[in-house]
Amino acid sequence: MGGQAVSVDVLNEAGAEVDEAEFAALGRYVMDAMNVHPQAELVISFVDATVMADLHVRFLDEEGPTDVMSFPMDELRPGTADEPSAEGILGDVVVCPEVAAKQAKELGHSAVEEMLLLTVHGILHLLGFDHAEPEEREAMFGLQRKLLLTFLASR
């Protein structure tokens, strides 16, 4: 990998079995693909359902644990190949493995695949993507699927 690598910290506070190196690589891959400044920073945290439920109520005023939450810091936006985004702290993506495992079972794939997808989803939120409107949803979900599949294919 050329140049300075983006900083991705993975914190496993959930006690779940998580391949931290794979999630760090995924974070770097997505930030690189979205032309985020090479010195940008990202934190990916895995928390248990109790912690996630607390965050969910505190920040979104919604009950119960959710699958993923994003906490942007410097409001970085995707760059271009010629001009990467500004330098700074992208923010935090918080994933709940318990909720991810439950969703994965309903969707018929592995908990790891679900957590990888949720991580990409969270990073895209940090970069300003949203899915409130149908066309935004289509663009964001298409992009997250493409990023995850190309990441997995490169492994």
Image: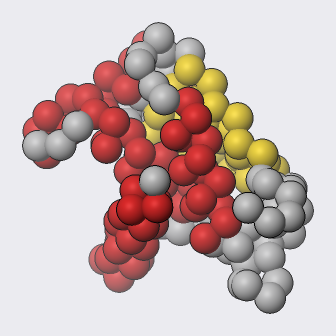
State the image coordinates of residue 142 (x, y, percent, origin top left): 35, 74
> In the figure, residue 74 lies in which quadrant?
bottom right
Front one among 51 and 155: 155
Seen as rendered, the residue at the extreme bottom is 82
The residue lying at 63 percent from left, 25 percent from top is: 11
The residue lying at 53 percent from left, 40 percent from top is: 23
Q: Is residue 92 above or below residue 123?
A: above
Q: Is residue 10 above or below residue 132?
A: above
Front one among 124 and 64: 124
Q: Is residue 74 left or right of residue 62?
A: right
Q: Quadrant of the N terminus?
A: bottom right
The residue lying at 65 percent from left, 61 percent from top is: 31
Q: How is the image coloured?
A: secondary structure
State the image coordinates of residue 120 (x, y, percent, origin top left): 48, 54
Q: Is residue 33 left or right of residue 85?
A: left
> In the figure, residue 105 lies in which quadrant?
top left
State the image coordinates of residue 75 (x, y, percent, origin top left): 75, 61
Q: Is residue 81 left or right of residue 64?
A: right
State the image coordinates of residue 111 (x, y, percent, origin top left): 28, 33
Q: For the image shown, how many numbered marks are present on the structure?
A: 0
Asked if residue 121 shows in the view, the reply is no
Asked if residue 35 shows in the view, the reply is yes
Q: Is residue 104 left or right of residue 135?
A: left
